[in-house]
Amino acid sequence: MSTLRLLLVTNSASVTHSMANLAENRAEIEIVGTAKTRKEAIQKIQDLNPDVLIVDSEMRRMAAIDTVRNVMHSRGLPVVMVTQPNAAGSAITIQAIADGAIEFIDRPTAHTNPDAADFGDDAISKIVFAHRTFPGRSKSLRIRAKSLTIQHDRLVVIAGATGSCRSLIDLFEVLPLGLRCPILVALSLETAYLEALVRRLDRMGVMHCAIARAGDCAVAGQALFAPSHCYVRVHPGGEIDVHPGAKIGNRQPTADVLFLSAARAYAAKCMGIILSNSTHEAVQGARALQNLGGTVLAERMPVGLNSDGFNPCEFPHRDVEGIAHGLLGHTEQTMLRIA
């Protein structure tokens, strides 16, 4: 892979320093310039022709969001946000993702070592993912699904990570209003990001969206999201258990727990959707779900699902309407791949 050229849009010396240190130690990226304002960023995009734009959410609120909007409208570049898991940072980040940003990384702090392997690997993987999956879907292609056969007794379970926020927003934008189908979601997100995303999806009006609580039930017209660092299990009839979950190694398999319980409770009446950048999410659960006759859609084929008899079909990445048709019962019981 050739080295990716990054343009930083930030007025923070610490962000600039941390990203520069990262670039010095990783061959995958190089910093070609820094811009402190939206106007300066637009000019440097023209002059430097970067591959990826890194935008700091802690610029003036509208500066960060306006930068993303201007870039999407005038040039079109993959954007990765640098943010913090607090109320203000998460709200700006989710808005930026809705406007076209693809990924986000946590803002380096005094307690973060930018040379540490975990920080570097996480940042690099998200930058590479943003570049690889761009261009995203054009907003002009988003046509809300209509006149589809809705199966009221079907349960839908969704797994994802940070790079799944945009895909989830895209999906909700094409679902029919008043969708009568229960949805359960497990995302690898910190609480602030998860709450900001759920609030935005709820405001879209497709269905009621909320963080799941003990005693909730999967009912038609509602999407429930597993709380951060918690496991959600669904039982026959839709009853839900919510409890804190310990990590297994360096992973917390919240999606696997949800998918496995859904497969056992609903079998062929369950559909699983694995959204982008979730390469290790819901692997065991997806296998169990398909083995019991359910349907699995994967926006990016998770590691471990391309063997053991799985025969994925290609599914165009930009055609998010296809996911909606599949969700509503218009696909065969097979593993589909959204390329």
Image (cartoon, rainbow, N blue to C red):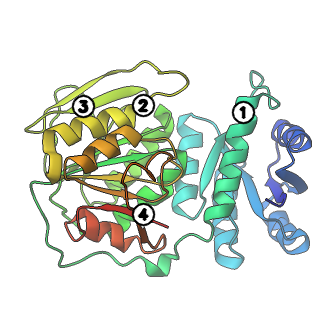
Reading the image, the residue beneath label 2 is 253
Compared to residue 194, the image places residue 128 above or below, namely below
Q: Nearer the viewer, mark 2 or mark 1?
A: 2
Please report the residue visible at 14 percent of the width from the left and 38 percent of the height from the top: 265
Instruction: State yes or no: discs 1 and 3 in contact (Cβ < 8 Å).
Output: no
Residue 337, numbered circle: 4
Reading the image, the residue beneath label 1 is 119
Residue 306 is situated, as x and y percent measured from the top left of the image, at 46, 53
Q: Amino acid at mark 2?
A: Pro
Please report the residue visible at 83 percent of the width from the left and 42 percent of the height from the top: 19
Reading the image, the residue beneath label 3 is 233
- Look at the numbered disc 1 and give the secondary structure of its residue: helix
For the residues labelled 3 and 4, the Cα–Cα distance comes to 25 Å
- Tell me which numbered mark, 2 or 1, is placed earlier along the sequence: 1
- Tell me which numbered mark, 2 or 4, is placed earlier along the sequence: 2
Mark 1 Cα-neighbour bin, 10 Å: few <14, some 14–19, many ≥20: some
Q: Amino acid at mark 1?
A: Phe
Q: Amino acid at mark 4?
A: Arg
The picture quadrant where one finds residue 151 is bottom left
The picture quadrant where one finds residue 320 is bottom left
Residue 282 in sight from this viewpoint: no
